[in-house]
């Protein structure tokens, strides 16, 4: 039977990256996507911007919406302090199965909790299920039509506190106009756009960083 692109991406990691070395896992995926097959990882250019925001926030609790193959999960988790926890939600079970193996290859499974299911179902259950009250950082990278409803849901569930930082991928390509309008016009957010490119291409894309003001 034919392999899938995520399976081929995992094989490239297992072939070219060193177990327990997150940077080599990130490099192996970027090489695969640049030279073999494009895949929708945040990528190296936007990834560096994400790294700088994560390092600045130095979060103890992180929520990632949209795991895919675990590329940004590995990038973020590799920068976290020892006691920090990253929860990543993935709707697609095939993606989740690959991501678990990529995260394990990087040696980051103790910092990461991968949860399979829809963000809309899981966001209201996180506090009771994982003993987390609020998130210091949220990375939105799942589905463009869910960014705004899930942000409102996080607010309603009290998962954001004064100073919580939201980072959203793909705000230009494919674009999340309703989300951008909301975080840029709401008095509850201070927003900033970081211009970049769609992963592994010359098309414009960028990250929107929004600080919740409470
Ligand atoms: O859906 C996504 N989630 C998270 N990150 C994504 C990402 O970083 C992307 F670059 C793309 C993308 C953008 C342009 C393109 F041509 C193909 C795919 C998508 C995406 C957009 C529309 C779809 F129908 C399917 C996938 C996503
Ligand atoms: Mg993305």
Image (cartoon, rainbow, N blue to C red):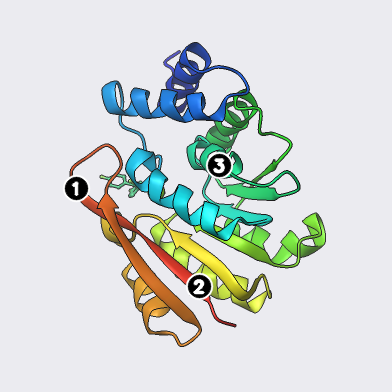
Residue 203's disc number: 1
For label 3, the crowd category at 10 Å Cα-Cα, with few meaning under 14, some 14 to 19 and many 20 or more, is many
**Are dots 1 and 3 in contact, CB under 8 Å?**
no
Q: Which label sits in the foreground, 1 or 2?
A: 2
Q: Is residue 60 left or right of residue 57?
A: right
Residue 148 position in % (x across, y down): 46, 70
The picture quadrant where one finds residue 57 is: bottom right
Which of the two discs, 3 and 2, labels the residue nearer the N terminus? 3
Image x and y of residue 184, in percent: 37, 78
Cβ of disc 1 within 8 Å of ligand 1? yes
Question: Is residue 92 in view?
Answer: yes
Q: Secondary structure at mark 2?
A: strand
Residue 177, percent across and down? 31, 70
Gap between marks 3 and 2 measured at Cα: 21 Å
- Residue at 55%, 37% in the rendered image: 74
Alpha carbon of mark 1 to alpha carbon of mark 3: how far?
Answer: 24 Å
- Judging by the rendered image, the residue that carries numbered circle 3 is 73
Please, is residue 99 above or below residue 163 in the view?
above
- N-term-proximal mark, 1 vs 3: 3
Q: Is residue 119 left or right of residue 44?
A: right
The residue labelled by disc 2 is: 211
Image: 137 above or below 117: below
Give residue 100's quadrant in the image.
top right
């Amino acid at each position: 039977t034919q392999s899938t692109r995520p399976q081929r991406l995992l094989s490239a990691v297992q072939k070219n990256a060193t177990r327990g070395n997150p940077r080599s896992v990130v490099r192996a995926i970027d090489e695969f996507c640049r030279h073999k097959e494009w895949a929708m990882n945040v990528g190296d250019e936007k990834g560096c911007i994400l790294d700088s925001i994560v390092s600045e926030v130095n979060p103890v609790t992180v929520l990632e919406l949209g795991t895919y193959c675990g590329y940004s999960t590995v990038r973020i988790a590799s920068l976290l302090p020892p006691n920090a926890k990253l929860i990543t939600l993935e709707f697609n079970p095939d993606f989740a199965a690959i991501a678990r193996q990529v995260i394990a290859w990087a040696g980051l499974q103790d910092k990461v909790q991968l949860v399979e299911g829809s963000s809309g179902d899981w966001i209201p259950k996180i506090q009771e299920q994982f003993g987390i009250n609020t998130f210091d950082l949220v990375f939105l990278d799942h589905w463009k039509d869910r960014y705004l409803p899930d942000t409102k849901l996080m607010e309603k569930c009290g998962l954001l506190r004064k100073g919580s930082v939201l980072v959203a991928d793909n705000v230009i390509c494919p674009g999340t106009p309703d989300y951008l309008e909301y975080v840029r016009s709401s008095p509850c957010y201070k927003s900033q756009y970081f211009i970049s490119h769609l992963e592994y291409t010359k098309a414009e894309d960028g990250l929107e960083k929004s600080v919740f003001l409470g």
